[in-house]
């Protein structure tokens, strides 16, 4: 699956530009500047996670990003926990897309997918408000499980983003479980597509793991952040995104024939 331009879409998560900024408590580096450069380098959209503890992206960042993506005619994918506070923020800013994710204060980054099956009574009302009042395309960040996919459809999500972290970690470590974890991603993507859900994927993707994930035909978008921000320290953001884009395009071309 590709966009109208015939490409698998690439969303760039800029959270960790804000992490570096916040380490010194100043204004630099600026997440908005990173977002603008990412779009200039070929990103199809920008992802930002406003956490409850505001450890990286801030409310002011979301305000600035909302204005920036509108000016540059690109979508903002607003990642958020399923809380009343975050729903109200999303309704106020009306981003193109909202991705509901699990969130724990003690975690370094998002650990695992949202358990929609267990939390459907909380997730369903949030999805409904975000769609009906905010006009957002709502995505649920889930483990590659047919059960989670089915419940995501039931609560009204239009998109599922499959958590690729376990597969990427296993592949990097040379763990023999990697092929099985990839198979689960493939099966979940096929199940979601069969149910009429758009399929995205993200978390932990790097240059080595992007090809197998990008080759899953049902996946329409990859969201990648930490790895590319890290690579940008050495080669610059444009070069880091450019190499990722080439690998994605090559993987999809191979899938096409």
Image (cartoon, grey):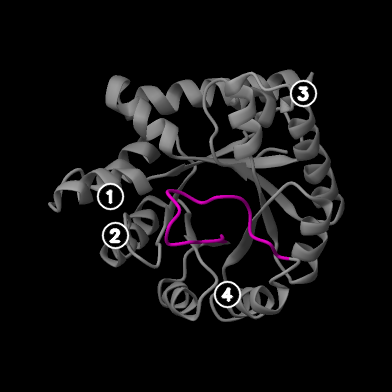
- Residue 164: x percent and y percent? 63, 39
Disc 2 packing (10 Å; few <14; some 14–19; many ≥20)? some
| Residue toward you, 35 or 154 | 154
Cα separation, mark 1 vs mark 2, equals: 7 Å
Q: In the rendered image of this protein, does residue 154 appear above or below residue 219?
A: below
Q: Secondary structure at mark 4?
A: helix
Q: CA distance from mark 2 to mark 4?
A: 20 Å
Reading the image, the residue beneath label 2 is 61
Q: Is residue 94 magenta?
A: no
User: Which residue was labeled with disc 1?
Assistant: 32
Main SS category, magenta section: loop
Q: Let me know if residue 41 appears in the view.
A: no
Q: Which residues are magenta?
A: 100-116
Above or below residue 56? Residue 135 is: below
Counting from the top left corner in percent of width and height, residue 132 is at 62, 79
Q: Residue at x 31, y 20 (%)?
A: 235
Estimate the spatial distance between the alpha carbons at disc 4 and disc 1, rounded to whole Å. Answer: 24 Å
What distance separates the C-alpha of mark 2 from that of mark 3?
39 Å
- Horizontal arrangement in the rendering, residue 1 relative to residue 86 (left or right): right
Q: Is the residue marked by circle 3 packed among few (<14), some (14-19), or many (20+) residues within 10 Å?
A: few
Give the mark toward the camera: 3 or 4: 4
Q: Which residue is mark 4?
A: 130
Tell me the quarter of the image containing the N terminus: top right
Residue found at x 29% / y 62% = 58
């Amino acid at each position: 699956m590709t966009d109208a331009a015939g490409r698998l879409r690439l969303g760039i998560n800029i959270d960790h530009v804000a992490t570096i900024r916040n380490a010194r408590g100043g204004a630099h580096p600026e997440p908005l500047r990173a977002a603008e450069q990412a779009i200039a380098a070929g990103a199809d959209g920008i992802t930002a996670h406003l956490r409850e503890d505001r450890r990286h992206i801030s409310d002011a960042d979301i305000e600035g990003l909302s204005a920036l993506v509108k000016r540059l005619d690109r979508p903002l994918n607003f990642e958020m926990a399923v809380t009343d506070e975050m729903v109200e923020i999303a309704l106020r800013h009306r981003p193109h897309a909202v991705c509901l994710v699990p969130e724990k204060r003690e975690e370094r980054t998002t650990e695992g997918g949202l358990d929609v099956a267990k939390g459907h009574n909380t997730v369903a009302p949030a999805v409904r408000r975000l769609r009906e009042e905010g006009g957002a395309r709502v995505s649920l960040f889930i483990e590659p499980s047919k059960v989670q996919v089915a419940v995501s459809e039931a609560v009204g999500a239009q998109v599922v983003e499959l958590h690729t972290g376990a597969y990427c970690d296993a592949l990097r470590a040379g763990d023999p479980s990697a092929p099985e974890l990839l198979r689960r991603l493939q099966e979940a993507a096929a199940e979601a597509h069969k149910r009429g859900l758009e399929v995205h994927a993200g978390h932990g993707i790097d240059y080595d793991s992007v090809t197998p994930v990008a080759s899953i035909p049902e996946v329409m978008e990859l969201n990648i952040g930490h790895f590319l921000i890290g690579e940008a320290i050495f080669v610059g953001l444009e070069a880091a995104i450019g190499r990722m884009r080439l690998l994605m395009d090559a993987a999809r071309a191979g899938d096409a024939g």
